[in-house]
Image (cartoon, helix red, strand yellow):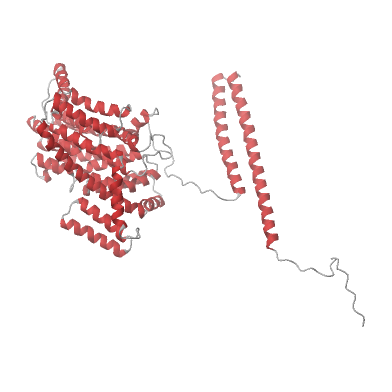
Amino acid sequence: MTTLVIIGLIALILLIILLGEPLYVLIGAVAVYCLLFSGVLSEPHQVSTAVIDETRNLIDNQVLLAVPFFVVAGALMTEGDIATRLIDFAKSLLGWLPGGLAVATVFACVFFAAISGSSPVTVIAIGSIMYPALINANYPDRFANGLVTSAGSLGILIPPSIPMIVYAIVDPTQFADPPGYTLSSGGGSTGVADLFLAGIGPGLLIAAVLAGYAMFVGAKHKVPTTKFSFPEVARTFQRGIWALLFPVILLGGIYSGVFSPTQAACVAVVYALIVEFFIHHSIKVEDLPRILSSSAVLMGTLLIIMALALGFNRYLELAQIPEKAVEMIVSWDLNLVTFLIIMNILLLIVGCLMDILSAILILVPLLAAIGFQLGVHPLHMAIIFIVNLEIGYLTPPVGLNLFVSSTIFRKKLSEVIRAVVPFMLLMLGTLLVITYVPTIALGPVSLLKGQSFIVNFPDKEVRETPKSAGGDDGDEAGEAGEGDDSAGGSELDALMDEVDDEMEEDNGSPGSELDGLMDEVEDEMEEEEEAKAEADDAAEKAAEKAAEDEAKEDADEAPPVAPDAGAGTPQPDAAPSPEP
């Protein structure tokens, strides 16, 4: 882009902000401007074609089908009786703890998040019931407000999660394994299933930290607790069994292979309808048009943002912005720790200024590629991304949970912001742990694949670019010889280690196993010598061939030499001169 084009882009952004237009208008205007004036398209009419093509491509994405179904399922459960039954069970199970009612609020949010997949919906459903209950139990008003607002943000991290589905759609790596990992199941629905599983550990960690703080506040203010009663637990469990079974059926069906995440969204709608209509009797037929219309409005807004953001991503792709950004970051020679610190700071700032879906659609194509090059697994990268933006739900000026909480609790926005500050600091601490301990996110995925639960960053952080084929035959032969030497050396070292171990176990006494290992060592040494000899022969032949080719080229290029009459060359007999 030229300086004039950049100035025009800044002016366009400021104008749209001053006019107070919605965010999707800003994204669409920036996308069209960049495609039109950056020079990436040769014809102006290709601009509209590029945006339309990206919108049409959404139709072909099967993972996207899960989003509207999860939206409808969340709306049905919010209107129904599931939230109340979950809260009753959590209170009977955890109410005896110090701060037991607050702890029950946290885990009620966890369960409802696993049902609805939405953070604002969780705040509305759980908060509208638990906030008055916390106030009546003598919890400080600011603490109660901050707790339900913060715990509700777990809705985007506990699976199923709508932001996770959107992330999977735009992730350029398709959750492939960087060097040093063997976790990937591939993109599409299998990638979404892995991402759902990766979110469980971080979600439970944040919930445990919030619950610990709730116990501290409850003990500090000497909030009365309830006596544990097994019959009461059994009664509330029986009443809430259908709500408690929902995440079990959903996640169990996904990881047992009964249905895909997209099909699980359809199951969620059918399950919610059956439970709320025929079991709880909390929704009537005349309520359906209102529920479906509100879901359609929400989904329509989401699709507009996705379509225009993907148009902007098309510009990034045509202008090769992600590739240039990767080259620039790699040229800075950043280590993994430094890159993750910079990325976390950037995402926290973005979370203050953009909603989570817009941030995912715009930034994932850039940052995911850089993280992949530096050795961050795409699943881990996605969780870091979502946790950062989860904190963004609690930060002004666009923190969505702040506005939801301010509306339903009738509080000033400044009061809600002050209430969430302690919880936001706790979540920042857990963000650091999740960022630098990949086992929290990747451990369950690795365990499901039959591997160790402990997953560390790979030893080598920057992925090497494969060398292009080429070079003369002698160089290739030499490289092949070196490769054989290194491979043979490593295998020989491994065999010698086995011999030493066997000798230590046998205390120096020869045995059949030791003899076998010695035979393997001798065979390996013979194979190594043969491979080295073959490599040397190949290099020598290549050098001789190169010398012959060079001599032949020199001979062809030499000018022809005129024959010398007196230099030993037989001359033809001279014709007899005529007589006078």
**Horizontal and vertical percent for residue 401?**
17, 41
Nearest the eye: 81 or 267: 267
The relative height of residue 51 versus residue 205 in the rendered view (above or below) is: below
Q: Looking at the image, which residue sits at the far right?
A: 579
Nearest the eye: 134 or 314: 314
How many numbered dots are placed on residues in this image? 0
**Horizontal and vertical percent for residue 511?**
60, 18
- Identify the residue shown where x is 69% and y is 57%: 552
Task: Find residue 537 and report its image quarter.
Answer: top right
**Horizontal and vertical percent for residue 242?**
19, 24
Nearest the eye: 569 or 112: 569
Judged left or right of residue 567, residue 280 is left
- Identify the residue shown where x is 7% and y is 30%: 136
**Horizontal and vertical percent for residue 452?**
39, 29
The relative height of residue 554 versus residue 69 in the rendered view (above or below) is: below
Judged left or right of residue 86, residue 435 is right
Give the quarter of the figure containing the C terminus.
Answer: bottom right
Task: Find residue 527 and report its image quarter.
Answer: top right
Give the quarter of the figure containing the N terminus.
Answer: bottom left
Task: Find residue 138 and report its image quarter.
Answer: top left
Q: Looking at the image, which residue sits at the far top?
A: 231
**Taking the image as drawn, is residue 139 in sight?**
no
**Taking the image as drawn, is residue 47 in sight?**
yes
Q: Looking at the image, which residue sits at the far bottom?
A: 580
